[in-house]
Amino acid sequence: MSLRPIALMNDRVNRAREDSDIALFHDLLYAGEFVVRLTTAAIVAAIDDDRDRHRYRLLHKIVRADGIGEWSGVLDDALSGPASQHLVPAAKEDRRLLTERVGPGNWQYDAVRLLLEAQQHIDPEKQPISGKVPLRSWFASFAELRNKTRGHGAPTATLCSKISPQLEESIKLICEHNPLFLRPWAYLHRNLSGKYRVIPMGGGEGVFASLKTVSAISQSAYQNGIYISFDSLRRVDLLYTDADVSDFFFPNGAFKGRTFELHSLISDNRQDGDASPYLASASELPVSETHGVGQLDVTNNVWSNLPPAPPSYIHRPDLETEITSILTNDRHPIVTLVGRGGIGKTSLALQILHAVAATSRFDTILWFSARDIDLLPQGPKIVRPQVLTEKDISSEFVNIMGYGAELSPKRTTIDVMSDSLRQSPHSGPLLFVFDNFETMRNPVDVFNWLDSNVRLPNKILITSRFREFKADYPIAVGGMEEPEARALIRQTAEALGIQDVIDDEYCRQIAEESDGHPYVIKIMLGEVADSKKTGRPKHIIARKDDVLDALFERTFANLSPLSSRVFLTLSGWRSLVPQLAVEAVLLRDQSEQIDVSGAVDELVRMSLVQRVTAPDKSEFLDVPLTAAIFGSRKLAVSPIKIIIENDIRLLQDLGTSSIHSLKDGVHPKILSLFAKAASRISEGKQRLVDIQNVLEFVAQSYPPAWLLLADLYEDVHGNDGSSGTAEYVRRYIEQVPDGDASREAWARLANLYRRTNDVIAACGAFVRAFGAADAPLTEISTMANWVNNNRTIITDLDSTDKRAVFGSLIGLMERRIDEASATDLSRLAWLHLHADDSGRANQIAELGLAKEPDNRHCQRLIERLSNGY
C-alpha cells in the first residue's frame, strides 16, 4: 500500500499532465515541496524530547516558516545537527540512508543527479555531480530550484517541457524509496469507549492492530492525529488531516500568536492551526528554583544535593506527620505524593526531607528534578528540567556521586544506578527523590525501572500531578486546611504590604474559593497588591490564563476522550453532582459500552475532580474552582460543546448542591430530577422515551428511583401502561427484596396485576405484601372478593393451579377466622369452593351463618352447595 498523502499528491500531478506543460511543471514543484515537508515532518517526529528541547526548537521554527528553504534547513538540523543525537534508535537507519554519501548505481545518487540536470536547464552554470553525494543535498537543491522558478521566475512552456521529465523522475525515485515513506503510517482517533479508530495510510498495518482491541483502553493514550511507527508510535505534529483522511495540511507560516496557517498542497485549501503549543521561547532555558545542587554536601546528618528548604513555609502538620512516618519506616520502598499542580507537593517534600536529614534513617538523600515550569508569584515560567529519562537520571547520579571511574563499555551509567538502587554503595541506605515525575518522557517506563531495582532499606520518594503506575504507596496532597490557608493568606498579605486590605471576610472568601490551593492564594493576593483593591477571588483567577494553563494543561492533555468529556461536563455545571447521575447522562444512547466510572476514577487520580461521600453513602463529584474555570474555558472551544451542554442541562435538573447540603444525601436530587422530567413531559416539552434511559440507569444505582419511574410511567400511560408500570415496580423489588418498603411495592404490584386481570400474579404479589400475621383483614377479604369474581379466569385453571392460587389466600384468612365477619367468611368459603374443597366451603358458610343468620352471601353459598354446585 503506497503512502496515502503521496498517492493523493500524485493524483494532482496526473490531472495537471492532461492540462498543459506549464501546469504539469508547477504541480511537480508542489509535489517536490510536498516531499520536502513530509520528509521533514517524519524525521522530526522521530526525535525524542530532551532537556534542551531540540525537537521543540525545530517545531517552533517550522510553524513560523514562510518558505520551503526553512523546511530544508530544519531537515538538515534533524539529520546532522544537534537534534540528530536524540533520534530514536529505530530511525538511525533512515538517517543513514538520507545522509550517507553514495555513488552511481544508488537510487539516492540518481535522484540528486536528475534534479541537478533539471536545474541546469535554468542555470547552465550549475555544476554536475562530482563524486559521491548524500540524498539530503536533494532537499536544499530542490528549494533552490523552486525559488528560481515558481518563487522568483516565470519559466516558459518550452522550458517547462524540458525540465519536467527529469524533475518528475527524481521525485518519483524519492517517493518510491524514501525509507520514511515505507514505514507504517495511520490516522488514530480515540473513541469515548477508549478504543481507537485506526485508518491505515501506508506501510504495514500490523503495528496498529492492537489499538483496535479492548486491551488498548488500558494502554498508553495517543492523541488524535497522524502517527508513524519507529518500533513505537510517534505523532507527526507537522502533518494534519481530517477524520476521513481525504486531505493533508502542513504549517505554512502566517504565525499570528493564536494561530498559524495550514496549507494543503493537494487541494490548495487553507485552515488555521492552534499556535498555543508553540508560544514559548525556543531559546536556552534557566534551571528551576528547585534544581538539585550539582554536588553532594553535608545537610544535617546526611550527604545530599537537596535544594534549600522553602522560605516562609506554612506547616501542614497532619500531612507532614503521615509522610514522615511512611518515608522513614522499613516498608513501602516507593512513596508517591500526588496532587494538583501548585498544591505544594515540592515544598512539602523539601520541608520533610530537611527534617529527615536530621535523623539517622538515611546516609544520603539524592534529589532529581524533572520540573519544566516554575510557579512563581509573578506567574509561571518555563525552566530546564534536570532529568527526563533513565539515562539522564543515571548520568546525573554518576556525576553527583563521582562514580565516573567505574564506567566501562560493559558497565553503563544505568548499570551503576541500578546496582545502587538495589544496594547502597555507602554504609547507610539511600533515599532517591524524583520531583515532578509526571514530566518524565515516559513516566510509567521510568517507574517500572525504579520499581524493579529498588530494595529496602533504600527508598524512593516521588512527587507527581498524576499517577499512572501501581506498586507504590500513594499519599494524596490536597488543598490546605482552613487554618493553614488563613495563615498563608496573612503571611503573604503582610509580605505584599496589603494586610490592611484583607479583612476576615475576604480572607475567608479567598480560602474557600481557592479550595486551599497555596499557589492560587498567592496569585490572588498578588493581583490585589497590583490593583490596590480587592475583587471577587473567582474573577481574579479567571483572568489568569497563563496560571490556569500551567496548573492544568498538561494534565488535561493526558486525559482519555471520555474523561475529558466528563471533566468538561462537570466544569460547565459548578455544583456537586451525584456520580450516578453523571454516569446515567453519559451512558444514554451509547451504541458501544463506555466506562464512565473508570473515567471518573481517572479524573480523581489526576486531581481534577474530588469525590465526596454523603452520609447515605452516595458519592458526589466536585470540581475545584480553579479547575472548573480552566474547564469552562476549554468547553467554550470544544468541538463537542453542543453535546456537552445537552448533558449539562440534564444534570441541572438535579438542582444545585453544596458541601453543606450533602447531609440530605442523594434522595432530594433524584426527586428533583424526576419532578423536572414530569413537568416537561406534562407540558409537552419532552417525551418520556427521550429521558427513559437516563432515569433507568439512575434507578439501577438508586433503587427507590424505580418507584418514581413507575409513577412517571403511570402518569404518562395511565391504565393502558399497567404492564410497564408493573415492570418498574418489579425492578425495585428485585433490588430491595425485604423490608416495609418492599411490602408496599408488592401491594402496589398486586393492584397493577388486578388491573390486567392476572389472577395468579395478583395473588402471588398480594401474599408477599400481606402475608404477615398483622396484615389488615379488610385487605385480605377485599382481595378474596376480587379473585372470587373472576369466574371466567378461574374456570380455565386446572386443579393444581387452583390449589396454588387460592391456597395462599385461604391460609391468610383461616388464620384470622375468629375475627372475620359473616361476609368475610362467605368469601373464604368461596375460595375453598374454587379450590375444589366443597366440604370445607360448607363448614365456613355454616360458621358465617352462626355469626349472622341473615347473611345472604352465606345463605346463597349453602343453597348452591345443596344443589350440587
Image (cartoon, rainbow, N blue to C red):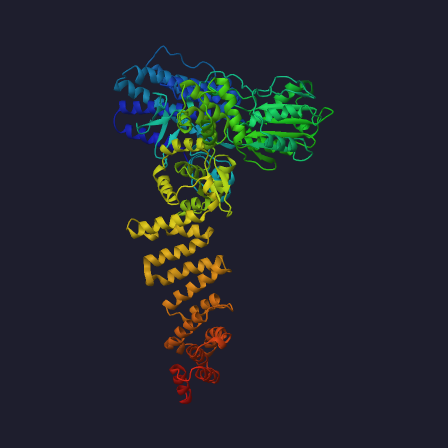
Image x and y of residue 752, in percent: 39, 65
Task: Describe residue 753's horizontal placement relative to residue 354 as left or right.
Answer: left
The residue nearer to you, when weighing 351 against 222, is: 351
Q: Is residue 185 above or below residue 378?
A: below
Picture coordinates of residue 665, whole percent (x, y): 47, 46
How many numbered marks appear?
0
The image shows residue 116, relative to residue 271, as above or below, that is above
Residue 223 image point, x, y percent: 44, 33
Quadrant where the N terminus sits is top left
Residue sitting at x 40%, y 69%: 758
Q: Residue lying at the far right in this picture: please name it.
A: 427
Is any atom of residue 101 visible in this view?
A: no
Q: Is residue 852 above or below residue 86?
A: below
Which corner quadrant holds the C terminus? bottom left
Q: Residue furthest bottom?
A: 867
Residue 547 occupies which quadrant of the picture? Answer: top left
Image-based side of 707 in relation to 220, left or right: left
Relative to 479, say whether 115 is above or below: above
Counting from the top left corner in percent of width and height, residue 372 is at 51, 23
Return the residue found at the far top.
Answer: 125
Camera-side residue: 500 or 313? 500
Is there any visible trace of residue 634 in the rendered image? yes
Q: Is residue 737 left or right of residue 424?
A: left
Question: Which one is in front, 824 or 713?
Answer: 824
Question: 240 or 34, which is in the foreground?
Answer: 240
